């Protein structure tokens, strides 16, 4: 399918997997595994989000890989410093050389009580620090069952982005991850499931930022695979893929990326 050549984003979050050596080996292996996949796709940006302990190894590996590859952190605290045991600040991530920060992942929301109100402080802080900021939104199975998925993600966006300066929008990305579809027990979504919510995301961005909201990339993530990625890529408001376990091996990442690019 031919579509307007907006930038296209493909990446994965390793969650609590991989040692520093394993992350570095993954990144180093991407270049030969991709071969000529990116030829003619100069608008593509890749990213990997490893554990904090892997970041000092991942950043130089990415610099040496010869790929359009961002390295991301899995979360960030909004304060510059303070008595926040176990947290990581923007200044710490800047010192390591991180490009991107992931915020609002469904596991952070469910397991660590990360609220929309907390994100309304974290997202502006990450953007203000100069990071590419990937904000996750998504409805639960219960919310989907009640038919309020679009309203849920619109609310999440409007609260989390309430303090964002429009000047920072070029560094903002949004990932739609339906909670009912992610993880090993998730139910793979269909493009029809995603289309209406993606429309709502685009509408909420427009309500908050006007015409500039149309330029914010929207990625889809949720049981993405080689077999189903093409249907999501073909959707009007989807600008990339946030892949789960299907991309946790070098060959898996390369295979999903190739299939997605073939479907554009």
Image (cartoon, grey):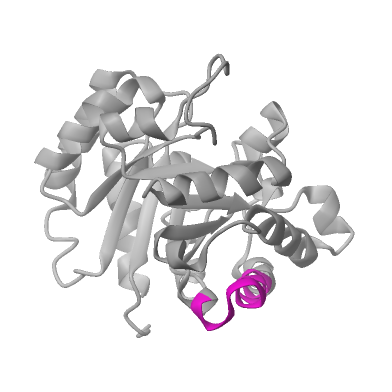
Res 144 quadrant in image: bottom right
Q: Quadrant of residue 101?
A: top left
- Name the quadrant of the N terminus: bottom left
Residue 207 among those drawn in magenta: yes
Locate residue 146 relative to residue 263 in the image: left or right.
right
Tell whether position 28 is magenta: no
Q: Relative to residue 64, is residue 261 drawn left or right? A: right
The residue under the point 25% across, 25% down is 56
**Residue appearing at x 47%, y 59% in the figure:** 173
Instruction: Quadrant for residue 258, please give it.
Output: bottom left
At which x and y percent is residue 36?
12, 60
Taking 187 as reference, is 143 left or right? right
Where's residue 51, x and y in %? Answer: 41, 26
Residue 243 visible, this orientation: no
Q: Nearer the viewer, residue 258 or 79?
A: 79
| Location of residue 173 with respect to 202 vertically, above or below | above
Task: Decide whether the magenta segment is chiefly helix, strand or loop.
Answer: helix
Q: Is residue 220 visible?
A: yes
**x, y (%) of residue 185?**
66, 37
Q: Which quarter of the image is occupied by the C terminus?
A: bottom left
Magenta residue span: 198-212
Q: Residue furthest right?
A: 146
């Amino acid at each position: 399918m031919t579509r307007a050549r907006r930038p296209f984003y493909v990446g994965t979050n390793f969650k609590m997997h991989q040692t520093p050596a394993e992350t570095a080996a993954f990144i180093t292996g991407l270049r030969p595994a991709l071969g000529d996949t990116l030829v003619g796709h100069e608008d593509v940006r890749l990213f990997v989000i490893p554990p904090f302990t892997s970041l000092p190894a991942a950043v130089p590996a990415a610099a040496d890989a010869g790929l359009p590859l961002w390295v991301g952190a899995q979360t960030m605290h909004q304060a510059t410093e303070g008595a926040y045991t176990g947290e990581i600040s923007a200044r710490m991530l800047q010192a390591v050389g991180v490009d991107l920060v992931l915020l609002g992942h469904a596991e952070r929301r469910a397991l660590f009580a990360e609220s929309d109100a907390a994100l309304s402080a974290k997202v502006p802080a990450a953007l203000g620090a100069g990071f590419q900021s990937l904000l996750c939104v998504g409805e639960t199975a219960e919310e989907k069952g009640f038919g309020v998925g679009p309203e849920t993600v619109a609310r999440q966006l409007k609260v989390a982005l309430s303090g964002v300066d429009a000047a920072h929008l070029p560094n903002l990305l949004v990932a739609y991850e339906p909670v009912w579809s992610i993880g090993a027990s998730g139910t793979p979504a269909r493009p029809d499931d995603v289309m209406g919510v993606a429309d709502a995301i685009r509408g909420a961005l427009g309500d908050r930022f006007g015409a500039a909201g149309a330029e914010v990339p929207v990625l889809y993530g949720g049981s993405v695979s080689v077999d189903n990625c093409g249907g999501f890529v073909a959707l009007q408001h989807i600008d990339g893929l946030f892949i789960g376990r299907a991309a946790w091996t070098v060959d898996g990442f390369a295979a999903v990326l190739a299939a997605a690019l073939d479907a554009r």
